[in-house]
Amino acid sequence: MPVLTRTLTVETRGHDDMINLTDQVGQVVASGDIKEGIVTVFVPGSTASITTIEYEPGLQQDLPRALERLAPSDASYEHDLKWGDGNGMSHVRAATMGPDIVVPFKEKSLLLGTWQQIVIVDFDVRPRRREVIVQVLGF
Amino acid sequence: MPVLTRTLTVETRGHDDMINLTDQVGQVVASGDIKEGIVTVFVPGSTASITTIEYEPGLQQDLPRALERLAPSDASYEHDLKWGDGNGMSHVRAATMGPDIVVPFKEKSLLLGTWQQIVIVDFDVRPRRREVIVQVLGF
Amino acid sequence: MPVLTRTLTVETRGHDDMINLTDQVGQVVASGDIKEGIVTVFVPGSTASITTIEYEPGLQQDLPRALERLAPSDASYEHDLKWGDGNGMSHVRAATMGPDIVVPFKEKSLLLGTWQQIVIVDFDVRPRRREVIVQVLGF
């Protein structure tokens, strides 16, 4: 069966919390019969993103600081004026970075760089329980 | 046949116009024989992007305002000095956000969040007729 | 064999150097037996990105100028304070733009726009030899 779809459950603290998913994604890839192909990592929801980064405490502060320049937390958002949930900036940051990443693998091994990790960044303004889709496609 | 390629045609107003493609993408996925896999949504062209967002009028203003901080409409662009088409900022915004999105599906249903929609954002400075590629791959 | 994985080697100058990969990616797609599907272009490493853009000298200056607003080269980065390699801004830019692009093709031809090119942008602060994964998946 050349497609395999799994769901990870991740507890986040919100507020740009970044969580390393690399080991769990690698385990899904290793668990199936597919030797070569892509794994799609996708977060359902519009206030979180999936990307790759060197997962270390410094960058966990630097990335949010940069996104603060793009979508400041103290700016006024039409989304918040209308819906009152106070997470307009979260939606904007997530739409800019995107909900998906596609990583190729070979011999069931992710073709990542040495310090490159797959992460979810949760931009929402409160703790969230997130489901993350990990789908393996190949042969 | 485990791959299905369709083209949507979309009329946009340019100027960060955002159009919801979710229903049309879902119909392409539902129309074929492929039960589980990915759909790639891709815009040919270098002044528009595909992403996901909660599609509501507030965010349709908030996202452009944030991108205005990244690539201001009143800045000077080398692209415009050279080519005179006045859409340097459109190219920069599109390259940053990217032309593609990959969404997994299962049982012919997109694995999106409840309010998460697939959209095209057209950054060009005039109305455009856009073709959007929707390609389903799986089994 | 419906999956084909190749590695390109690219020499960059770093400092937002942008290199056009379109011809090489097109050649990989044309070289195999797969007629219709996706090509994933992925850079292992956390200080470079893959995107599409009109590849011309003006935009090669405009994109870095915009990213300078997001992640200024003269800002203070926790990553640099901790590791001293001076490329905190490179990591932030790469994580925002992402390491991957997925482009659909049909009849072994990439479905790109006329002036839309696939590029690597190397945000690191020194010349780098980069490997870029090009993986074709389809039927």
Image (cartoon, coloured by chain):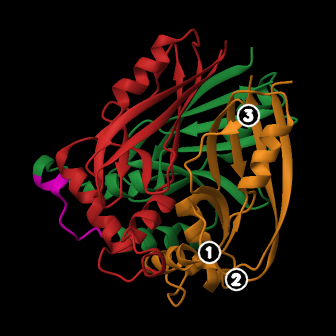
Chain colours: A green, B red, C orange
Mark 3 and mark 2 residues within 8 Å of each other at the beta carbon: no
Residue position marked by numbered label 3 in the rendering: C108
Residue B32: give x, y in percent of width and height: 53, 11
Residue position marked by numbered label 1 in the rendering: C90
Say which quadrant the C terminus of chain C sits in.
top right
Q: Quadrant of residue C14?
A: bottom right
Tell me which residue sits at (85%, 33%) in the image: C32
Q: Is residue C18 highlighted in magenta? A: no
The residue range painted magenta reads A72-81
Task: Give me the C-alpha separation between circle 3 and circle 2.
Answer: 36 Å
Q: Secondary structure at mark 3?
A: loop
Mark toward the start of the polypeptide (1 vs 3): 1
- Residue A62: assigned label: none
**Which amino acid type corresponds to the residue marked 3 in the rendered image?**
Lys
Residue C114: give x, y in percent of width and height: 56, 51
**Which amino acid type corresponds to the residue marked 1 in the rendered image?**
Ser
Disc number lying in front (3 or 2): 3
For disc 3, the neighbor class at 10 Å (few under 14, some 14 to 19, many from 20) is many
Q: Is residue A75 highlighted in magenta? A: yes
**Looking at the image, which is closer to me, A135 or C124?**
C124
Mark 2 and mark 1 residues within 8 Å of each other at the beta carbon: yes
